[in-house]
Amino acid sequence: MLYIIGIGLSDEKDITVKGLEAVKKCKKVYLESYTSLLSVSVAKLEKFYGKKITQAGRDMIENGQERILDEAKKKDVALLIVGDIFSATTHHTYLSEASKKGVKVLVINNASVLTAVGVTGLQLYKFGKVTSIPFDNSNVEEPINVLKQNQKMGLHTLFLLDLEPLSGKFLSIGDALEYLMAKGLAKNQICVGCARLGSKDYFVKSGKASELVKEEFGKAPYCLIIPGKVHFMEEEALEMFK
Ligand SMILES: C[S@@+](CC[C@H](N)C(=O)[O-])C[C@H]1O[C@@H](n2cnc3c(N)ncnc32)[C@H](O)[C@@H]1O
């Protein structure tokens, strides 16, 4: 059996009771380690879960899928995903390939950055298409185009920012704003930067692009929001983060 388990956004205690019970009975535990980042070490997770964890980078998750599914045919295997499971573009293939191979799967959900951004007071129902800004972005048009499309409809835009957790590399909110301003974003556009959502020390700051670009957000992970048409209640909520 393959258990695909969201382990939440912050630390070892964010796993659900159902998720923890599943991890405890698994013979092998993989942690997907390239699409997001917790605020605690793998050693801390291992201690709390009482299990040895194998970190799986992009190569193991994408090219080692067959092997992981074969293992799950013979024994209980857990695949842990930081945040929730299907908020990265890659993980649904585990479900579809498992079904083709006749491997049983149990999905155990958790919180995601896609809903944690609600702490800003911007209404989740009013977000448009989500987009990602990569490290190497000078010739990339997709994020700025998505912003323009969302803005036309008055919708908020969430930018996910590139990261390589295994090598400690993170695109900062400042880098993201520099990219957007180079592509024509107005310097006085109100933006909302978010770091470590779901953690005790989460940090949200709202302000003009030209101000936020200089702001220090502390440790990763980071995301950035450009609000669309703002309801007065949303505006009031953003006041908290000025
Ligand atoms: C592929 S997404 C989704 C990750 C995860 N599976 C989830 O459900 O939250 C990863 C991106 O989300 C953003 N992100 C993830 N966790 C975050 C957090 N706690 N605070 C702020 N941004 C976060 C970062 O921009 C990161 O590059």
Image (spheres, rainbow, N blue to C red):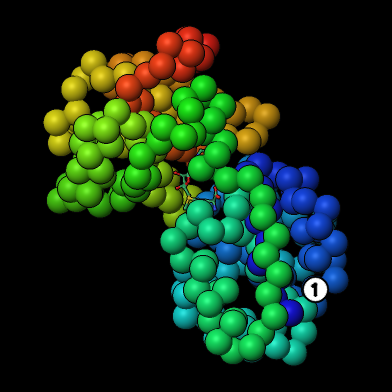
Identified at 25% across, 43% down, the residue is: 146
Residue 129 as seen in the image, left or right of residue 94: left
Q: Residues within 10 Å of mark 1 (few under 14, many from 20)?
A: some
Where does the image place residue 28, in percent across and percent down from the top left? 74, 76
Where does the image place residue 203, in percent across and percent down from the top left? 54, 25
Where does the image place residue 88, in percent across and percent down from the top left? 48, 57
Q: Specify the amino acid type for callout 1.
A: Cys
Is residue 92 at least partly visible in the picture? yes
Residue 32, picture quadrant: bottom right
Q: How many marks?
A: 1
Question: Looking at the image, is 100 positioned above or below residue 235?
Answer: below
Which quarter of the figure is the N terminus placed in?
Answer: bottom right
Q: Which residue is mark 1?
A: 26
Is residue 171 at least partly visible in the picture? no
Question: Looking at the image, is 236 positioned above or below residue 88?
Answer: above
Q: Nearer the viewer, residue 24 or 150?
A: 150
Identified at 42% across, 28% down, the residue is: 193
Question: Looking at the image, is 51 positioned above or below residue 233?
Answer: below
Question: Looking at the image, is 82 positioned above or below residue 209?
Answer: below
Identified at 67% across, 65% down, the residue is: 107
Residue 225, picture quadrant: top left
Which quarter of the figure is the C terminus placed in?
Answer: top left
Residue 56, picture quadrant: bottom right
Where does the image place residue 184, in percent across and percent down from the top left? 14, 31
Q: Secondary structure at mark 1?
A: loop
Residue 228 as seen in the image, left or right of residue 74: left
Asked whether mark 1 lies closer than 8 Å to ligand 1, one says: no
Identified at 48% across, 28% down, the residue is: 123
